[in-house]
Amino acid sequence: MTLRYAARALACASLLGVAWASPAFAWEPTKPVEVVVPFSAGGASDQMARSIQGIIAKHKLMNQPMIVVNKAGASGAEGLMDTKASKGDAHKLLVTSSALYTVPMISQLPFNWRDLTPVAMVAMDEFVLWTNAEAPYKTPADYIAEAKKQPGKLKMGGTSSKREDQIITAQVERKAGVRFIYIPYKGGGEAATQLSGKHIDSNVNNPSESIGQWRAGEHRALCVFAPDRMQYTNKITGTQSWGDIPTCKEQGLDVQYQMLRVFMLPGGVTPDQQKYYVDLMQKVVATPEWKEYLEKNALKNDFLTGQKLTEFLTADETRHKDIIKEAGFLAAK
């Protein structure tokens, strides 16, 4: 077949609506793929995993189904160790956050992210200082002033102990010279519910974990712990978009923290198996549904794979070690 004839045949097929088969993968799943979420249902990681599960199913990006499984025991250690123990199993994916290195640092867990195979970082997540909308606090300064009036009395809720939420809380305490009672919950969903019920005074949930309460007028967003304001300008509440939330630094509270959202395979998989999932995630992030998900949940669009991802994980691990040591959470050797 000449190139000219092949081109004509392809054009005719396109006009007739004929679907041309995509090239076969060197490897692809032969049974359902388990996505391990090392956190409880309802949290940001769980929501993201289930959204991606839906995108893959809708666009038929995989021939096998994807099953999301929550393994939240021991502040995420259960999910990390389960993935580590599944060496060579390319039908298992871990979706996680900075817990990839913070959990081992604070607990001496015999785990290192290098035990696994990086696939893709799909986004960076923000943290917001939330209070109950019926409370009198309009700015972080208002809330900090009250915390100083009542040292060690106000309650800050968060996901688990000595994880991202408590790390941010410790940074706020140190920068502002205040003390909170930190109350750990199984996930951000529970922390949001407790704030709505006024059982705590504040939390530092991710945007996706409190969007429903914010839209319903139950929570107030005081500031975002980011170097810059979020980029999304569509209104979420009657008056505010994510971009309307000032940074904490703008408001005089110089604390910044962002968290990666990353997919990892167990160690011992083949390059072809790793490539399959890298390609899969590239297809996912190219869909309109993913772009909508990023905006709805105020995630920062940041996609990394390969050597750039490895370099990022190495640098981010070092940064977290410094933060955790400063907070006094680093486990003694």
Image (cartoon, rainbow, N blue to C red):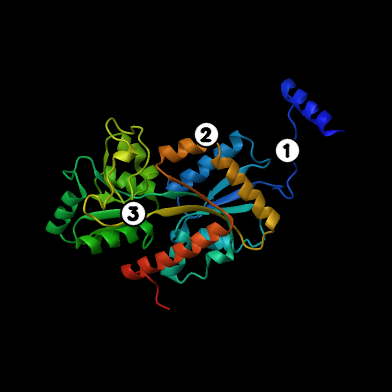
Q: CA distance from mark 1 to mark 2?
A: 21 Å
> What residue did someone put label 1 on?
22
Question: Which residue occupies 32% across, 56% down?
Answer: 256
Identify the disc placed on residue 158.
Answer: 3
In the image, which is nearer the foreground, mark 3 or mark 2?
2
- N-terminal of the pair, mark 3 or mark 2, is 3
Q: Amino acid at mark 3?
A: Gly
Instruction: Residue 250: give x, y in percent of width and height.
Output: 24, 50
Tag 1–tag 2 contact (CB < 8 Å): no
The answer to whether 255 is drawn above or below residue 20 in the figure is below
Question: Which residue occupies 56% across, 66% down?
Answer: 114
The answer to whether residue 200 is visible is: no
> What residue did someone put label 2 on?
288
- N-terminal of the pair, mark 1 or mark 2, is 1
Q: CA distance from mark 3 to mark 1?
A: 46 Å
Q: Amino acid at mark 2?
A: Pro
Q: Amino acid at mark 1?
A: Ser
Task: List the single residue furthest toward the top.
Answer: 16
Question: Which residue occupies 26% across, 57% down?
Answer: 254
- N-terminal of the pair, mark 3 or mark 1, is 1
